[in-house]
Amino acid sequence: MLADIDFWHRRYAQQVSWSLEARRYIFNKIGLEKFDPILEVGCGSGALLSSLYQNGYAQLTGLDIDLHILTKFPMHCAICADAHALPIASSSYTVVICHFLLLWLSHPHIALKEMRRAAQLGGWVIALAEPDYSARVDNPPELLFLGRAQTKALIAQGANVTIGAFLGELFEQAGLVHIETGIIQPKEFSSFNENDFEMEWAVLRRDLAGYISPQKMRSWYHLDRRAALRGESIHYVPIHFAFGQKI
């Protein structure tokens, strides 16, 4: 169990790096100050909160339903609770944020309404990163089935794999205004990155365990690695963000 938590903490930290530029853009757009109180719903191991703390944001609270992961990576202030029913007083935070959370929730519209309730008047709700696997792109063509298999496996795990494309509608339903949506631009790598490649494949192996034979996975791995070394490997899933204000 500990090894899994350590692995996912590294994965979450990698995902936090993907949304860095979007984070900077949004925080600048809403005029977020370093002393403004921030709540992250679905904080997991605290990868995002740690990044925010390192950048000078001090009033940070994390909330997650998994007590074990909160215990392993304690935040300055951590709450174990369900995103659908936040044990938070209304109008408590300048920003209520989530990161790769809504796709895993059974009722994301309810969670967003709770996040809005927890935000101060004039405050903001931010969904910083939510995917849309329906627009996934994979290359080489021989790996198209790999992408489709992972998407099916995520659906079987309970994920809403297209939620990123509907963030604007969900924010409107939650009663937020001044809504802006966008897509995080993928990083461009000039050369093969061993750590990133191996991390992606570690996640693929976990997602597809029991769906695809180990022999087939090995074959796909070596095919993808050869393509990556040639600079031809692509596994792109659009990641959407949205933010809106409570008035």
Image (cartoon, grey):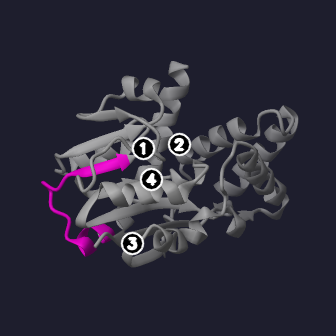
Kind of residue at badge 1: Ala
Secondary structure under tag 4 reads loop
Among the two numbered marks 2 and 1 on one chain, the one whose residue lies closer to the N terminus: 1
Mark 1: few/some/many CA within 10 Å (<14, 14-19, 20+): some
The N terminus sits in image quarter: top right
Q: Earlier in the sequence, mark 4 or mark 2?
A: 4
Quadrant of residue 78 within the rendered picture: top left
Could you say which disc has been placed on residue 13 in the image? 1
Q: Nearer the viewer, residue 127 or 113?
A: 113
Residue 228 location, quadrant = bottom right
Q: Which mark is residue 175?
A: none
Nearer to us in this view, 105 or 73: 105
Mark 3 secondary-structure assignment: loop
Question: Considering only order in the chain, which callout, 3 or 4, is on the residue closer to the N terminus?
Answer: 4
Numbered label attached to residue 176: 3
Residue identified by numbered label 2: 195
- Tell me if label 4 and label 1 are in contact, CB under 8 Å: no
Residue type indicated by callout 2: Asn
Can residue 65 be seen here? yes
Asked if disc 3 and disc 1 are in contact, CB closer than 8 Å, the reply is no
| Residues drawn in magenta | 25-40
Distance between mark 3 and mark 2 Cα atoms: 39 Å
Residue 31 is inside the magenta segment:
yes
Numbered disc 2: secondary structure: helix
Residue at point 61%, 46% (across, down): 200
Q: Position of residue 125 (x, y in %)?
A: 36, 63
- The label nearer to you, 3 versus 2, is 3
Residue under the image location 64 percent in, 38 percent down: 202
At a point 70% along the width and 49% down the height, the residue shown is: 225
* Tag 2–tag 1 contact (CB < 8 Å): no
